[in-house]
Image: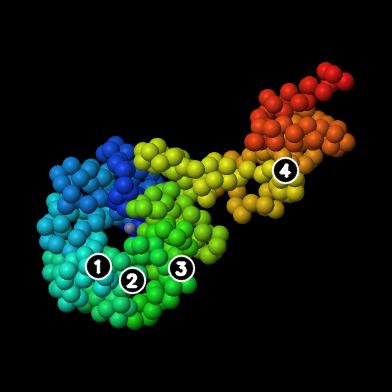
Amino acid sequence: MNEPTKSTVVIDDTTLRDGEQTAGVVFSRDEKVRIARTLDAIGVGEIECGIPAMGAEERADVRALVDLGLAARLITWNRAVISDIRASIDAGVAAVDISLSVSDIHIEHKLRRNRAWVIEQLKTALGFAKEHGLYVCVGGEDASRADMEFLVELMEVARSLGADRFRFCDTLGILDPFATFDKVSFLRRRVDLDLEVHTHDDLGMATANAIAGIRAGARFVNTTVNGLGERAGNAALEEVVMALRYACGTDPRIDTSRFVELSRYVGEASCRPVPEWKSVVGERVFSHESGLHADGVIKNPLNYEGFDPAEVGLTRHLVLGKHSGSHGLMARLRLLGIEIDRGRAEQMMPQVRMLARRLKRPLEDAELLGLWHGPRRVA
Ligand SMILES: [Zn+2]
């Protein structure tokens, strides 16, 4: 991959790892290839593409992705054990995430070990990976609940042994953006090692926390297409990128025009269809119905749209329904080749509202034309 300048945020998309880890989601090799190719083509810097230790099939999938010769760096997920890292080397990748549980609750109640044992695991696994010339991200599982001084100690060991970055994981999705900012800032100040944020959406804050982590100095961020991922999911690629562009004013250098295409494809392949109201890529998020909003958008889309829908591959819908006004009706009829004046439009609005109320939805063009022709026939 092109090594980014220090200030550039690197997207590490994990649709093919944490995304596939979602209960019930399985991608075929062809699907993985298409998703990886698209992520690469739109400029995603890194793709977390699987867990080679899972077995021969998974290794062959990863190998197939390596063979594509993408510009994006491919990284795999590994426990901090040599056999996992060996499996990644066998699959042909040059970068690994080595994951360790770092919170006391995980260390005591999941691993049934102690902090010293975790440090020893790190030294052994990292030492082995570095001997084999791998790029290494050290992943701190459950870092959001870990003792911060222990994280500093662990990161210091990682840095001194040549790790390339540390992944701060809010594994349970229990942080808010303020706490994320504080914790990432603290680590940034204390250890000279690149940071990555890995966030989950259990409280609906995965994207907000990812952005907070970046603003606190993390240079890498984990995303998934549509926010797919364990439980409530991860930070959505499309949300993080658009938030960076429009909320933070930084250019993540991603071709966003294929977001909808990618989102629909991953929705299909994961059997998790994209809701129409999904932020950034939902089919209906650029629908305007209320009189005031539709009128504003007709005058200038910037009145009620934070960005042009075409930027992500969507189209704008001016919806005619219960909350519409006469300007919206005139504009919609104009698209159907019918010019009417304001007075006639105002006369027609009660019928539009009544029908929309009865149908409990906006009007289709045919229904609108029915209304238009209907009264004229009886008049
Ligand atoms: Zn995760």
- The total number of labels drawn is 4
On screen, residue 308 versus residue 54, left or right, reads: right
Quarter holding residue 6:
bottom left
Residue 194 appears in the picture as rendered: no
- The quarter of the picture where the N terminus appears is bottom left
Identify the secondary structure beneath mark 2: helix
**Which residue position holds label 1?**
106
Residue 49 appears in the picture as rendered: yes
On screen, residue 308 versus residue 240, left or right, reads: right
Identify the secondary structure beneath mark 3: loop
Identify the mark nearer the N-term, 3 or 2.
2
Considering every residue shown, the one lying at the far top of the view is 377
Residue 32 versus residue 268: which sits nearer the camera?
268
- Badge 3 vs badge 2, beta-carbon distance below 8 Å: no
- Badge 2 vs badge 1, beta-carbon distance below 8 Å: yes
Identify the mark nearer the N-term, 4 or 2.
2
Dot 3 amino acid type: Asp
Residue 316 drawn at (x, y percent) = 62, 41
**Which residue position holds label 3?**
176
Dot 4 amino acid type: His
- The quarter of the picture where the C terminus appears is top right
Circle number at residue 323: 4
Quarter holding residue 369:
top right
Ligand 1: which quarter? Answer: bottom left
Dot 2 amino acid type: Arg
On screen, residue 9 versus residue 119, left or right, reads: right
Circle number at residue 145: 2
Identify the secondary structure beneath mark 1: helix
Residue 280 versus residue 108: which sits nearer the camera?
108
